[in-house]
Amino acid sequence: MLRLGLLGCGRIGQVHARSIAQVNGARVAAVADAFPEVASTLAERTGSAVLSSEELIANSDIDAVVIGTPTDTHYDLILAAAAAGKAIFCEKPVDMSADRIRACIKAVDAVGVAFLTAFNRRFDPNFANLQARLAAGEIGNTEIVTILSRDPSPPPISYIKSSGGIFRDMMIHDLDMARFLLGEEPVQVFATGAALVDPAIGEAGDVDTAAVTLTTANGKICQISNSRRATYGYDQRIEVHGAKGMLRAVNILENSVESAGGTGFKRAPAQHFFLERYEAAYRAEMQHFIECLHAGKAPSPSIHDGLRAQMLADAAAQSLQTGLPVQLASS
């Protein structure tokens, strides 16, 4: 039985605690959070101990840590966990700085601990099914990937100011998905964007509506569309066009009932929040991590995948600022 330590007991920490409870072979042994009451509540729910972050990482009874704390704390926690020989499950982004992620890679590789960057969308049953069929050659050689990702409404401006921007905060999931589906690395990034949803987002130095085009060395194209507003729910769609046809994953709706009348056909809106939309994906990624630790295998996506996604996000931000395409470095 693997003993996991949760670093961060907020919304995402609670999601991971629920996932662990549904996966065989592991349990939450300890939790830590900057807010004692939050930690105590989750500890009571999971039957675990409340420790400080330092105590949890140093505890010899803890086999692996799940990092669900704010991004600016990841760097120090990763270095400490690696030094303690703990396997690491880390929420995206690994860090806002590609150079600091490279430093984390050195620390993780030096001791050989397992590391999973939690790009949960790779584990969504529908997206995973699409990728498997794509890899099996069902539609031949991939030509164009289209990813649509739109939130129901923007987050608070206070969050926008510390998020790192739409490319590093929101689109980073889609940038990782692009790599997952293209099967090869993008070499060029071109981005455009505007503040169309809320002028205050523009005043905070960010955009709320963005589009990015990625191009690989072989000429494959990925188009990503992001918006902080979708009046019809949480919009999450993928389409891949290939030489032999097309694969598509559509939105998950609140229900599958369809009505018809004189005004036409009506369906339910898309599921409204990312926690319900990706509940199965969160559980599957945790199951993958735990199974890899039991089998002594390296989990995927790795910390190197976290770096590549961050590099793409940085390149998109640079392209938006300059109005020019950006060429990608190899690492």
Image (cartoon, rainbow, N blue to C red):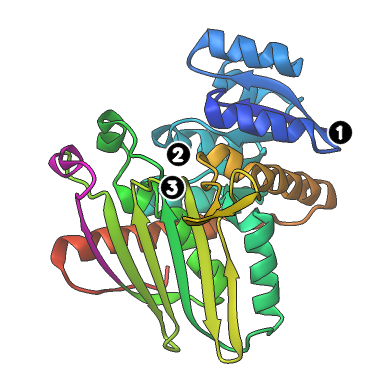
Q: Which residue position is annotated with label 1? A: 1
Give, as a three-letter code, the residue at label 2: Tyr
Q: Give the residue drawn at x 39%, y 55%.
A: 171
* CB within 8 Å, label 1 to label 3: no
Determine which quarter of the picture holds residue 50: top right
Callout 2 environment at 10 Å: few (<14), some (14 to 19), or many (20+)? some
- Quickly name the residue at label 2: 75
Q: Is residue 90 left or right of residue 162?
A: right
At label 3, which amino acid type do we have?
Answer: Tyr
Highlighted magenta segment, given as a residue range: 190-203
In the displayed image of the protein, which residue is found farthest to the bottom?
243
Q: Earlier in the sequence, mark 1 or mark 3?
A: 1
Q: Which mark is residue 41?
A: none
Which residue bears the numbered disc 3?
A: 232
Q: Is residue 126 left or right of residue 47?
A: left
What's the residue at 55%, 8% (across, down)? 37
Quarter of the figure that contains the C terminus: bottom left
